[in-house]
Structure formats: structure tokens, C-alpha cells
Image (spheres, rainbow, N blue to C red):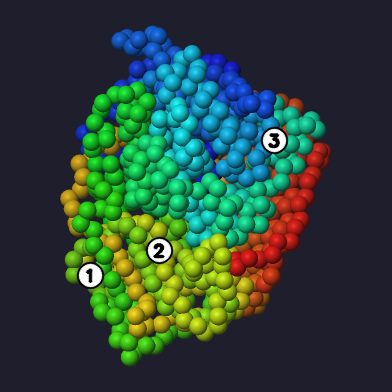
């Protein structure tokens, strides 16, 4: 999750006059006009959805109000559900208005529902993301929406991140009224791909801090602090503690995953949207390859965000395509959307490494199938002179290169696989690096690069990380993609097994899906390391690893290359701007952070990465301010003794009243254990109101 959401409170029922949409400047020619609005005004109705056990879920219904001439006044509407824990009445309200209004003006009712025990909904918070209770409630919500007097009986489900995750999961349960979904920046593989164990390896970032803070907040705008309200929320067990106790794959993660064995069960028509700068992008081509459900996909250059507000760009008005999708599946309009190329993908072109680049160069391609037609695999063999060769080293020349484990390297690779990154040369200096000869022609990559490493290690636990990069003639190195593999998980993520010192292993690593066009004269680079910190928690043992060449299992790289086809017809509209909600202003953000520093203590032999971010928002009923900060410390000589410290707070300013919710997270490790400490605090008008602390020792399990 990347937080970045601003807030406002809706009154029970209101209508806004139609405001002409303005189109932002676009670098693309627009050859297809956006869908025309059919409704001039929108009303937002707050309602309750009853569950079988008596708990009520809170919903904001965004509804058409006042048809334009030519629209039937008694029209029945399909419903589009977005189902989240992110507090519809404050945390996401301004964003919800901007997102949902587009569909409502085109003849849909959208429902923004708070998950049980979060936001305005009743009940106790779930004990984790994507709980069985969340899914049961979701089925009841879909049924309720299909039976409303305004409904035509058809329901769609959409969402980004969490909302995309549970759209996929609930679609697999096949509720009768659910006719189609749109899942954005989401994955069907929870252990390997989700934010807690990236590539199956332990990861800790601001989601854990922010989510375990938000779980404690009571409903806006009253923010009650009675015993019942605080006992169910502020006292709820932090989710990260539960995830820390499940360090290997298994039923805990498989229960809500589609991969690897449930694609045949998945039949709901699905429009998948993602970006090459998002960590969840692999799910999109996997669904195309393995599911028999009707599919459409849009894979752009973006990060974890909506394409109409993409940063970096180019931004597009994806809701044009989304509305056509909904019209086809929820209204029965024969608009030809399923006769078009169903996989539109952005071919990224080289750019100089820049964490603040505003727009990714490239062009759109339209693929009819996945894997793409005419894709071929080219193998590059790692050679002792640190080049990528066309032929495998002969078996008689078997040899190896040694690599000293340096736990503190990796900050240049970002916080997950997809962030915009800096020049890779600082981390490459402490990695095993292999370059191709300068390319004699432009070369296009599209798909999953695969790495096969023949390795050995002096320790019982080691991770291997591979980064694929583009080396420009001036020496700058732009990372394209990468991935990691825990040596203990080489055969099974569910049953990890220690490595035997100095025994050779073949470690296959599938890098995350990528597109890239290498220019003539550039070089292809792979860099291999045993650390990628602070993205991945360091393994606990000092060690030396070796990479081996020659023989049938020689180390090698396989690249999926595609023809340099001409760009697809540009047809995306520029993003449409919705008038903001009145009385709302905001500034700043907690993620991406406002500052990021790396400090190396030469005497202590330690490295510290620290970041912090702030935002503030003003609403008709008051103000809210958020602060987050985290710091990561590792010692190269003692990798087992790693630490993370985080602090976060939400301040609510109301007339004559100020509330401050805050949390503190401390996690440290040694060779055998993780030591977890978490605090929640609530202060009202300067006086401590409630405190809760969790402290637990959790054994390390091959992490």
C-alpha cells in the first residue's frame, strides 16, 4: 500500500451541480472521445447494510440525480462496489468522490463500503487482511446491492490495492449477482507477492505502521472515546504481529490466493490494470496465461496509483475503457470491447536513472495473446570474465566467483520491485556484475526474465537477488526489474530447508515482469547480491557465497524478447478533472516521504536508512494531520542484529477538542528470534486517555 489519500466528511444526502470537466494536457493524440455524461448531478446517500449476525456495514451510495434530456427517468442502474477498510468518511472521501463520480455521471450507482470494524462500520475489526469474515460480508453486500429498488440486479466490483485484492478473492466465490470486476494494482498470490513477504522474503514498510495505527481510530466525525468504542478498536491486536508468525507459505496464505491451483475455479470477467512501477504487476499476465475467464488488461508505466493521476506519467483516462467494460458486462451493450486486442501494454524506453522522473518514455503495444505472439527467448551465459556470452562455458572450465555478504547494500533498488530508482553503480560495486557486449540494434524485452544461478554458500541460510539493468554508454545504470530467492525456499516456500555449506545448488529466479527497449550501443547487465536492504530483512549469518560457471547447470540469464513492432494506435483520452468537494484542502503526503537519508557510522560499522512524511487536511468539521517516520539499522559485521523503529500519529482537531492517536513499532532480531514491541496511545485535549502495549518473541523461521 502507498497511503497518499486525502480526507473529507459527507453529509447524509447532498447533490452537486454539474460542472464542466476540463481536460489536462496530453502527450498523446486522442482519437476516441470519452464517454458522455448522462446525469448532471450526483447525490451521496449514507446507508446501513445489515449482516446476518446483526452487525451493520456503513455504505456511501453515489447515485445519479437529475438525468439529462433523453435519459429515461425511471432507469434501473447496475451497482459498482468498492470494499475497503480505509475509512470512507475521512481517509478516502475526497479520492472516492473523484473516482466514483465519473461512473455515476454515466449511469451507475457506486457503493463505497467500510469493512466490518473499520471506518463507520459496526463490529470488531478483522484479525488480518482478506479474512473469511470480510469475504462472507462481501457476499452479503453484493446480494444487498442487487436487490435495491434502483438496481437492475447486476453488480460489478472494483478497487486498487486492497480493493483489487478482495475483488479477485470474492470473484472466485462466484456470487450470482457479480457479473464482472476491475482489479488494479493487486495480486492473486499472497505469500510471494504481497507486501509482507516480497518474493517470500521478510519485508517491513509503512503499510504495517499506518494500518496498525488506523485500526485504532473510531468513526468520524464524532470520534467517540467511550469504553466500547476503544475496546474494540484501540485494543485490537496489530496485524503485523500475526504476519510475523507466518514466515513460510501455507494455508494461512493459500486460503485467499488463486495461485497456483485455483485458476480453473476463476470464471468472472476481469479487467486487470497495473503498472511496471508497481510491485503487484505479475498477476496480470499470469491471469491471462492460466485463467479461462474473459480478460482484458492494461499494463502501463505507472506506480501504485490510478492511471488518471499517475506519477510518473503519462496519465490516461482509463475510466473510458472501464465504462465500456461495465456497459458490456453490466448493461449488455454490444460495444465491441471484447473484439479488440485485450492486452494493452506500455513498452518502456531507456531513461537515465532518476527517482523524480515526471514521465516514462515509450509507446503502447496491443497484444492479442499472452505470452505475446512472436516472443522468443534468448539465453546469455555468465562467464568468468564477467560478461554475458552467447555460449555456455565448457564443462572442463568449471570455476567460480566469490562474493562477501554485505548486509547493508540495497537502498538504490528501492522499497519494493517497481519503485523509481537511482543509479545502480553504488550497489553494483558490491555485487557480482555481468555485462553484454554493446548491442548492435535496438532490442525489446517483454515478459519475465529468468535467471538460473549455480551457487554455494558457507552459511545455512542465504538469499540471492538479481537485478536486470541497462548500462548506457556514459556508464549510468538504470534498473529495469529484479527479484529475490531464499536459498532455504529453493524447493518449497512452504517447507524451507537449511543449505549445506559449500554444496552446489541450482537456484532459479523468475524476475518480475518487465518491458524495456534497449537502445543500440547500450549493454545488458545482471547484478547478483546476497542482500537487498532495507527492502528485505537481512539473513543472520556472516558468509561468503560462490557463483559457478560451466557444466549442465551453468549460471545463465534467459530474456523474453519481442519484435520491434510499430506502436499501437494511440486512443487514450486525457484525464478528466472532477470538481473537488467543497470545503476541502490538503497538502503534503506521508508516502512517498518528504525526506530520505542514509547514514553510515564508520566506527560502529552500521548503516541507517531513515525517512519521514507529513500531510494535513482541512474539512468543514475540522482538521486532520498525519505523521510517519521509520528508520532501519544494520551492522555489516553482525547481520543478525538488525532493527526497525517506526512512529506514526493522526491528530484530529475538532471545535473545542483535540485527539491524538499514535503508535510506536520496534522490531529487532538476533540469529534465533524476532523481538516485537508495539504501542498504541490516545490523548484527548492533552491528557492520556488510553494505552495498549504488545511485546512478544517470535522464532525466526528461515527468514
User: Which of these two is toward me, 638 or 455?
Assistant: 455
Residue underneath mark 1: 439
Residue underneath mark 3: 124
Residue 614 image position (x, y, % from top left): 59, 45
Residue underneath mark 2: 510
Q: Is residue 341 above or below residue 152?
A: below
Q: Is residue 693 above or below residue 148?
A: below
* Occupied quadrant, residue 587: top right
Picture residue at 24% right of the left edge, 46% below the top: 368
Pair 3/1: label in front: 3
Cβ atoms at labels 2 and 3 below 8 Å apart: no
Residue 22 image position (x, y, % from top left): 35, 27
Q: Is residue 9 visible?
A: no
Rounded to the nearest whole Å, what is the CA distance between mark 2 and mark 3? 40 Å
Picture residue at 62% right of the left edge, 73% below the top: 540
* Occupied quadrant, residue 154: top left
Left or right of 664: which side holds 82?
A: left
Q: Tell me the element at label 2.
A: strand
Picture residue at 38% right of the left edge, 69% below the top: 451
Rounded to the nearest whole Å, what is the CA distance between mark 3 and mark 1? 59 Å
Report the residue that reaches farthest toward the bottom: 396
Q: Residues within 10 Å of mark 2 (few under 14, many from 20)?
A: some
Of the residues under marks 2 and 3, which one precedes in the sequence? 3
Residue 434 image position (x, y, % from top left): 35, 76
Of the residues under marks 3 and 1, which one precedes in the sequence? 3
Cβ atoms at labels 1 and 2 below 8 Å apart: no
Q: Tell me the element at label 1.
A: loop
Amino acid at each position: 500500500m502507498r497511503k497518499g489519500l486525502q480526507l473529507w466528511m459527507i453529509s447524509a444526502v447532498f447533490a452537486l451541480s454539474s460542472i464542466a470537466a476540463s481536460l489536462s494536457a496530453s502527450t498523446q493524440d486522442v482519437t476516441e472521445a470519452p464517454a458522455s455524461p448522462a446525469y448532471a448531478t450526483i447525490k451521496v446517500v449514507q446507508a446501513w447494510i445489515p449482516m446476518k449476525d446483526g452487525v451493520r456495514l456503513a455504505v456511501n451510495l453515489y447515485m445519479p440525480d437529475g438525468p439529462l434530456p433523453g435519459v429515461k427517468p425511471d432507469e434501473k442502474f447496475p451497482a459498482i462496489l468498492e470494499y475497503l477498510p480505509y475509512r470512507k468518511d475521512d481517509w478516502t472521501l475526497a479520492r472516492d468522490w473523484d473516482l466514483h463520480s465519473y461512473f455515476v455521471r454515466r449511469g451507475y450507482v457506486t457503493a463505497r463500503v467500510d469493512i466490518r470494524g473499520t471506518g463507520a462500520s459496526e463490529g470488531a475489526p478483522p484479525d488480518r487482511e482478506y479474512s473469511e469474515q470480510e469475504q462472507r460480508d462481501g457476499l452479503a453486500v453484493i446480494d444487498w446491492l442487487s436487490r435495491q429498488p434502483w438496481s437492475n440486479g447486476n453488480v460489478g466490483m472494483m478497487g486498487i490495492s486492497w480493493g483489487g485484492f478482495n475483488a479477485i478473492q470474492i470473484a472466485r466465490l462466484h456470487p450470482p449477482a457479480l457479473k464482472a470486476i476491475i482489479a488494479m494494482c493487486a495480486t492473486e498470490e499472497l505469500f510471494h507477492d504481497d507486501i509482507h513477504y516480497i518474493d517470500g522474503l521478510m519485508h517491513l514498510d509503512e503499510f504495517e505502521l499506518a494500518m496498525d495505527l488506523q485500526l485504532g481510530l473510531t468513526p468520524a466525525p464524532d470520534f467517540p472515546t467511550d469504553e466500547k468504542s476503544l475496546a474494540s478498536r484501540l485494543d485490537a491486536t496489530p496485524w503485523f504481529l500475526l504476519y510475523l508468525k507466518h514466515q513460510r507459505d501455507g494455508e494461512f496464505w493459500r486460503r485467499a490466493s488463486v495461485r497456483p491451483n485455483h485458476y480453473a475455479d476463476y470464471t468472472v470477467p476481469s479487467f486487470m490494470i497495473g503498472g511496471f512501477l508497481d510491485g503487484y504487476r505479475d498477476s496480470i499476465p499470469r491471469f491471462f496465461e492460466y485463467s479461462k475467464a474473459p480478460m482484458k488488461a492494461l499494463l502501463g508505466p505507472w506506480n501504485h496509483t490510478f492511471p488518471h493521476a499517475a506519477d510518473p506519467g503519462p496519465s490516461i483516462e482509463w475510466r473510458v475503457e472501464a465504462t465500456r467494460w461495465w456497459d458490456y458486462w453490466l448493461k449488455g451493450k454490444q460495444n465491441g470491447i471484447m473484439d479488440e486486442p485485450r492486452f494493452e501494454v506500455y513498452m518502456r524506453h531507456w531513461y537515465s536513472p532518476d527517482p523524480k522522473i515526471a514521465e516514462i518514455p515509450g509507446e503502447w503495444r496491443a497484444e492479442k495473446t499472452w505470452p505475446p505472439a512472436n516472443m522468443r527467448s534468448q539465453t546469455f551465459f555468465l562467464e568468468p570474465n564477467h560478461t554475458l556470452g552467447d555460449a555456455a562455458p565448457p564443462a572442463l572450465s568449471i570455476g567460480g566467483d566469490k562474493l562477501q555478504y554485505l548486509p547493508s547494500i540495497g537502498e538504490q533498488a528501492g522499497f519494493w520491485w517497481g519503485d523509481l530508482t537511482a543509479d545502480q553503480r553504488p550497489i553494483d560495486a558490491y555485487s557480482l556484475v555481468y555485462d553484454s557486449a554493446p548491442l548492435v540494434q535496438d532490442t525489446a524485452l517483454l515478459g519475465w526474465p529468468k535467471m538460473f544461478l549455480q551457487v554455494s554458500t558457507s552459511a545455512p541460510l542465504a538469499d540471492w537477488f538479481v537485478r536486470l539493468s541497462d548500462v548506457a554508454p556514459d556508464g549510468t545504470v538504470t534498473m529495469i526489474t529484479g527479484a529475490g530467492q531464499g536459498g532455504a525456499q529453493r524447493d518449497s516456500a512452504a517447507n524451507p530447508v537449511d543449505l549445506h555449506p559449500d554444496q552446489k545448488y541450482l537456484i532459479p529466479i523468475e524476475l518480475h515482469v518487465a518491458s524495456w527497449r534497449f537502445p543500440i550501443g547500450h549493454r545488458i547487465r545482471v547484478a547478483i547480491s546476497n542482500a537487498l536492504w532495507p527492502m528485505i530483512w537481512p539473513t543472520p549469518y556472516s558468509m561468503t557465497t560462490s557463483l559457478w560457471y560451466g557444466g549442465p547447470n551453468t549460471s545463465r540469464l534467459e530474456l523474453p524478447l519481442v519484435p520491434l513492432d510499430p506502436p499501437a494506435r494511440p486512443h487514450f483520452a486525457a484525464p478528466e478533472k472532477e470538481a473537488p468537494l467543497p470545503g476541502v484542502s490538503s497538502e503534503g503526503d506521508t508516502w512517498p516521504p518528504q525526506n530520505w537519508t542514509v547514514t553510515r557510522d564508520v566506527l560502529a560499522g552500521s548503516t541507517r536508512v531513515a525517512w519521514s512524511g507529513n500531510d494535513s487536511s482541512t474539512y468543514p468539521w475540522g482538521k486532520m494531520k498525519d505523521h510517519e517516520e521509520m528508520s532501519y539499522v544494520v551492522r555489516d559485521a553482525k547481520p543478525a542484529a538488525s532493527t526497525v523503529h517506526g512512529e506514526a500519529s493522526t491528530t484530529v482537531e475538532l471545535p473545542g477538542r483535540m485527539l491524538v492517536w499514535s503508535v510506536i513499532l520496534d522490531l529487532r532480531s538476533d540469529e534465533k528470534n524476532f523481538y516485537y514491541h508495539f504501542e498504541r496511545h490516545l490523548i484527548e485535549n492533552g491528557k492520556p486517555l488510553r494505552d495498549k502495549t504488545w511485546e512478544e518473541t517470535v522464532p525466526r523461521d528461515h527468514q
